[in-house]
Image (spheres, rainbow, N blue to C red):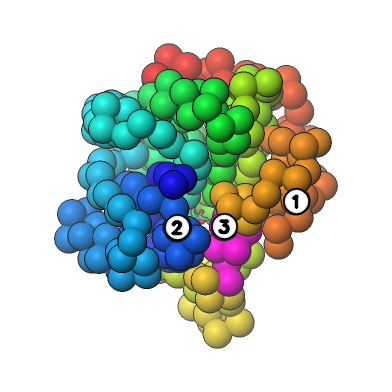
């Protein structure tokens, strides 16, 4: 039985993805930061398929010690990990910093980078046995507004919207570089845009943008519909994804051309290099 690890699994897209993968007979590891919400999600996912194993791990992506601890715990207690969905993320309502790095970028990129690295031994071991391990990063069409020149810099007057765009560009570039670094090892990597989805996402966003999110609610996709591309990347046969699409950005379960001058092999490699000291 395959095992999938999903961050931000207690809500929205993460929960919908976990439920759907349980129904496809995956064992699940749910990564959540709040124990009560995590236990409720664990129950909901277990109900989706009582025959699978559903584990819960508790950590916060901005607290790297908790991230490393959880990865170690999973590596010691599980003998395989087939799919990692780096799903957690949020739109910041104000600009805050962790170690002089914008907080949502820290959670969404640095936290997931460190998590992925500390799970690599288990991912590689599984790939050596099965030849098919996948890492899926939740990006967004918001990558369009991202700019790598802002990465890792303290910019006190950065707009929360641009901070989010930077997070999503980093998620996309990390998937691209991971695909390159893991080439030939049986590990593929993708970034996805789920569409505009009715979740807790944007619930704290103030001002004009917050109004747009709440007014757009009825027009947005359900979490189940929004999760379809993540589920496709996790569960579809590799042939359906396409060998040459390793590292690509997907929406509506199909690879999409990207439009941002910062999406280059060189920028992806620089992001990787600058992220390594956090591991
Ligand atoms: N909804 C959309 O329209 C949309 C569009 C494009 C991309 N996305 C992306 O889809 C992903 C999932 O978002 P969603 O729409 O499902 O939103 P959501 O319902 O708000 O879920 C976000 C999840 O991330 C978790 N999370 C946030 N910060 C965390 C941290 N520091 N450590 C650990 N977990 C953390 C949340 O935990 P708590 O419940 O404890 O806060 C929650 O489980 C995000 O990466 C988002 O950028 C969403």
Mark closer to the observer (3, 1): 1
On the picture, is 242 further left or further right than 197?
Answer: right
Instruction: Indicate yes or no whether the magenta region holds residue 230.
Output: yes
Q: Is residue 235 in sight in this rendering?
A: yes
Q: Secondary structure at mark 1?
A: helix
Q: Secondary structure at mark 3?
A: helix
Query: Which quadrant is home to the C terminus?
Result: top left
For ligand 1, the image quadrant comes to: bottom left
Instruction: Indicate yes or no whether the magenta region holds residue 160.
Output: no
Of the image marks 1 and 2, the number of the one nearer the N terminus: 2
Counting other residues with Cα less than 10 Å from the Cα at mark 2, is it few (<14), some (14-19), or many (20 or more)?
Answer: some
Q: CA distance from mark 3 to mark 1?
A: 13 Å
Say above or below: 27 vs 155: below
- The residue under the point 47% across, 17% down is 276
- What residue is pinned by disc 2? 25
Q: Look at the numbered disc 1 and say if its residue's Cβ is closer than 8 Å to ligand 1.
A: no
In this view of the protein, which residue sits in the foreground, 52 or 261? 52
- The residue under the point 26% across, 27% down is 76
């Amino acid at each position: 039985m395959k095992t999938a690890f999903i961050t931000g699994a207690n809500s929205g897209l993460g929960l919908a993805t976990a439920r759907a993968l349980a129904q496809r007979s995956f064992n699940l590891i749910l990564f959540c930061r709040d124990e009560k919400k995590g236990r409720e999600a664990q129950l909901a996912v277990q109900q989706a398929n009582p025959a699978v194993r559903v584990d819960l791990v508790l950590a916060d992506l901005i607290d790297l010690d908790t991230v490393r601890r959880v990865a170690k715990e999973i590596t010691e207690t599980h003998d395989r990990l087939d799919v990692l969905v780096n799903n957690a993320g949020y739109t910041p309502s104000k600009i805050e910093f962790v170690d002089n790095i914008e907080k949502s970028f820290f959670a969404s990129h640095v936290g997931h980078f460190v998590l992925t690295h500390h799970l690599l031994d288990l991912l590689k071991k599984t790939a050596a046995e099965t030849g098919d391990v996948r890492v899926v990063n939740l990006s967004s069409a918001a990558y369009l507004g991202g700019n790598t020149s802002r990465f890792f810099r303290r910019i006190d007057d950065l707009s929360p919207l641009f901070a989010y765009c930077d997070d999503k560009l980093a998620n996309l570039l990390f998937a691209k570089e991971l695909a390159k670094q893991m080439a030939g090892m049986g590990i593929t990597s993708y970034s996805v845009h789920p569409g505009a989805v009715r979740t807790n996402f944007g619930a704290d966003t103030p001002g004009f943008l917050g109004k747009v999110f709440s007014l757009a609610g009825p027009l947005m996709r359900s979490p189940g519909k929004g999760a379809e591309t993540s589920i496709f990347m996790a569960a579809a046969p590799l042939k359906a994804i396409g060998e040459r699409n390793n590292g690509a950005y997907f929406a509506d379960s199909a690879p999409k051309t990207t439009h941002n001058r910062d999406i280059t092999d060189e920028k992806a490699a620089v992001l990787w290099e600058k992220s390594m000291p956090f591991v």
